[in-house]
Image (cartoon, helix red, strand yellow):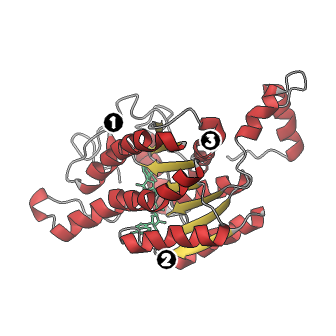
Amino acid sequence: MRHTLSARAEAECMVRIGLFDERNKEHGVVLERLSLTNKTAVVTGGGTGLGRAMSLALARAGADVALAGRRLEPLQETAAEIEQIGRQSLSVPTDITVPDQVTHLIQSVIEQWGHLDILINNAGIVRGQEMKPVWEITDEEWHRGIDTNLSGAFYGVRAVARHMAERQQGKIINVASGFAYRGRRNEYMYTSAKAAVVNLTRSLALSLVDYNIQVNCIVPGFFIVQPPDSPVGQQRREQQGRFLAVGRTGEPEEIGPLAVFLSSSASNHMTGQAVISDGGGLSAGLGPLSVAPIADAE
Ligand SMILES: NC(=O)c1ccc[n+]([C@@H]2O[C@H](COP(=O)([O-])OP(=O)(O)OC[C@H]3O[C@@H](n4cnc5c(N)ncnc54)[C@H](OP(=O)(O)O)[C@@H]3O)[C@@H](O)[C@H]2O)c1
């Protein structure tokens, strides 16, 4: 069951937890540091799933958000939601595996809005890769998996880093996966690419630190991105939730605040970090997936 707070109840709650305590003005500063007012962002894969949730959260925190993905329709749907929040949005059809398209994405957003403060490299192939023996993986499948889950993030950073360096400010957030930290039977491209995304984050962080650009990585565990009542979503909730310490899978909205934090000045002293949001899955060792005695959980 979802709980939503009225604006008044939310304000009262904030007073209770000290964020709006008049006796200590510093608490007000905490919220100001999370504000993204006057910031602009690009979110790849921003039309669906976690990318959509992060885009809406950034917009609620005050940012204008450009969305990139191959299909225009989901981008436009999320863009309409961002505009309802009162922020601007751009939909830029982009295949992140094609370097020229990624460069065009970044340049067109800078031309339109004059500056780009935040890049979230979220697009990835989550499902749809057939799991099969290593000798059956074609060159095309290997390169598509690596390009979508790793090279696309590199192309994005390469396209935006000089702009951010010249402005002496920037936030880059890569999206990896719990599979960066564990293997999976008959899965090669996703696990390899996501592990590389974590280390790409570290190298970029060290390389861009002199330009006041922070580069961090979000590591999601199991989040249900299917529509709430879809049979696949229900099945994933049941099958995957029981392996997690918290006893349930994540909901996309739970990633949004983390993206806001890493996009904001509140995280200025953090760089090169991989922040895991997985309901305690990796901490607890996580139940085995796709190996005996438990059947594949997807
Ligand atoms: N959901 C989870 O449990 C989970 C767990 C760990 C990590 N993640 C990571 O979170 C990110 C988002 O996944 P999600 O769960 O939200 O799944 P999703 O809804 O399928 O989102 C993937 C997004 O990436 C875009 N995309 C895929 N290939 C692309 C390409 N070549 N060029 C441009 N855009 C491309 C898709 O849009 P188009 O198809 O229109 O291009 C889509 O919007 C991924 O990086 C995924 O690995 C998710």
Query: Is ligand 1 within 8 Å of the beta carbon of the residue shown at mark 2?
Result: yes
Q: Amino acid at mark 1?
A: Gly
Horizontal side of residue 14 vs 254, given as left or right: right
Q: Amino acid at mark 2?
A: Arg
Question: Mark 1 or mark 3, which is nearer to you?
Answer: 3
Residue with the most extreme top position = 23
Q: Nearer the viewer, residue 37 or 146?
A: 37
Residue with the most extreme front position = 166
Question: Mark 2 or mark 1, which is nearer to you?
Answer: 2
| Residue 179 screen position, x and y as percent | 33, 45
- Place residue 42 in its image quadrant: bottom right
Please tell me whether mark 1 sits on a helix, a strand or a loop: loop
Q: Which mark is residue 71?
A: 2
Callout 2 environment at 10 Å: few (<14), some (14 to 19), or many (20+)? some
Horizontal side of residue 1 vs 236, given as left or right: right
Q: Earlier in the sequence, mark 1 or mark 3?
A: 3
In the rendered view, would you say 16 is above or below 242? above
Callout 3 environment at 10 Å: few (<14), some (14 to 19), or many (20+)? some
Identify the residue position indicated by label 1 in the image: 287
Q: Nearer the viewer, residue 120 or 237?
A: 120
Please tell me whether mark 3 sits on a helix, a strand or a loop: helix
Horizontal side of residue 130 vs 169, given as left or right: left
| Residue 132 screen position, x and y as percent | 18, 60
Spatial CA span between label 2 and label 3:
28 Å
Residue at image x 22%, y 67%?
A: 141
| Residue 2 screen position, x and y as percent | 69, 47
Question: Mark 2 or mark 3, which is nearer to you?
Answer: 3
Q: Earlier in the sequence, mark 2 or mark 1?
A: 2
Horizontal side of residue 155 vs 231, given as left or right: left
Identify the residue position indicated by label 3 in the image: 261
Residue at image x 41%, y 38%?
A: 206
